[in-house]
Image (cartoon, rainbow, N blue to C red):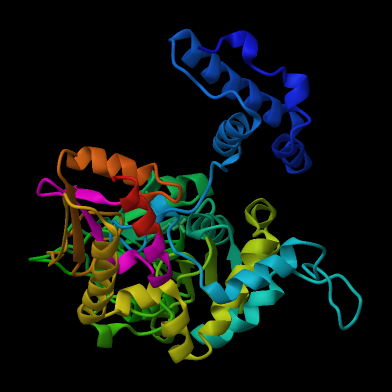
Amino acid sequence: MNTCAAIPKVDRMLLWPAVTAALRVHPRPVVLASLRAMLAMVRGGLLRGETLLLDEETLSERFLRALDAATTPSLRKVVNGVGIIIHTNLGRAPLPRAVVPLLDDVAYGYSNLEYHLATGERGSRLDHVAGLLRRLTGAEAALVVNNNAAALLLALASLCAGREGIVSRGELVEIGGAFRIPDIMSQSGAILREVGATNRTHLRDYEGAISSATGLLLKVHPSNFAMVGFTAEVSSADLASLGKKYALPTMVDAGSGSLIDLKRFGISGEPTVGDFIRSGVDLVTFSGDKLLGGPQAGIIVGREEFLRPMSSHPLLRALRLDKLTLAALEGTLRLYLDERLALAEIPVLRMLTVSVAELRGRGKKLLRRLRRTLPEGFSLELIDGVSQPGGGSYPLLSLPPVLLTISRDGLSPQEIESRFRSARVPVVGRISSGTFTLDLRTVMEEELPYLVSALLTLV
Ligand SMILES: *Cc1c(COP(=O)(O)O)cnc(C)c1O
């Protein structure tokens, strides 16, 4: 029977190789706290009468476990087994692999963020992506900020402060995270002028509301809900013509902002940003991390005469993008120069367009591998599910799932769900019809080993 007196002193442990190695890479207070946490556990065990090994090897190993828990970053990788491609809680769009080296380059060291290498003079951070955005959307000018909410705020403040912005009652949407169109308008200083009825708005409604106080005609894409039945809305082309007739700017908040037409993959109702520009509207705003599949960003494209005042607006300074985001955005946009490349390399597009047959193939491969390693008592099944509209923030982006159901004798689905969530690389799934399930659409091929590791925690 060993006692607390047999525990080595901290001073001595500080000389152990495991601890000295830890001190080279981790802050000393964190290493000391991990040592103390480990010792408290050991003392607790001894006081309960447990027989514990107190040699260097055993204690070092316990220390490393405590240190690991203390140094795991708060923000970290998870595997999305929920099947919702643009999942706000899980970081929205996963970035293309191809942009990661670009981030590395710009992150470690200096960059030409606001410096013209050709002339040696001061440059603008916006120039790194403006040309690409013009080319990809056909717009005259482009500007980027932190997110689409910021893009709207800046555009409204610049074009419409103290004036009326006319919006259809059917488009006064809440996007999620308490983001509501009426609120953002009032924050910008624009005055909301609602027209039409919830389900139907006609061109004459907009026209009837135009007065000397009007500053903008705004159309908002109702990204996360759809109206069916007796409905009417005004097309962006008709709104653009009305704007021209009265010399008023027109703007579309496109929300997702797709750069390529996804109709041939069965995803309809998402006009591209280029379509909006061609329809004649003056400005289009959209997110960088929804359908575009890049980093969080807000993009405004459109007529130079309206974008120029925005680029010198004081709000721009408060909303400006960071260099890492710019690097990721430029890298993502470059992939769009070749549609084939974009579809192959951008995870959001790949997940949207992957066939059910391919998902089944991925599932079968995984099953074969798992059945070889797992002991008795596990039940794994591959099933075609039904998509759950309304299951997430963007129902449009929840497609027919191929589900892997996982159960194990003696474990409740809640327990399985919780163990997967606590895995070294957490795997987030859901319980459906009383069984823990993973939707393979959002699990990348290279993430399959993480599923295996999470499963092994159930053994
Ligand atoms: C998502 C969305 C926003 C907000 O965009 P963020 O990039 O999340 O700030 C604004 N408008 C519409 C229509 C949206 O779908």
Residue 268, can we see it?
Answer: no
Across and down, in percent, residue 237 comes to 34, 81
* Image region (quadrant) for ligand 1: bottom left
Task: Give the residues in magenta.
Answer: 429-449
Q: Residue furthest right?
A: 120
From the viewer's perspective, is residue 166 above or below residue 57?
below
Q: Is residue 439 above or below residue 68?
A: below
- 86 with respect to 184 (left or right): left
Q: Nearer the viewer, residue 341 or 66?
A: 66
Q: Is residue 4 left or right of residue 273?
A: right
Q: Taking 422 as reference, is 10 left or right?
A: right
At horizontal 65% and vertical 58% (from top left) the residue drawn is 320
Q: Residue at x 65, y 25 (%)?
A: 35
Q: Nearer the viewer, residue 416 or 213?
A: 416
Q: Is residue 133 visible?
A: yes
In front of the other: 147 or 398: 398
Q: Position of residue 399 (x, y in %)?
A: 22, 69
Query: How many marks are shown on the rendered structure?
Result: 0
Residue 323 found in image quarter: bottom right
Q: Position of residue 251 (x, y in %)?
A: 44, 69
Any magenta on residue 122?
no
Is 438 a magenta residue? yes
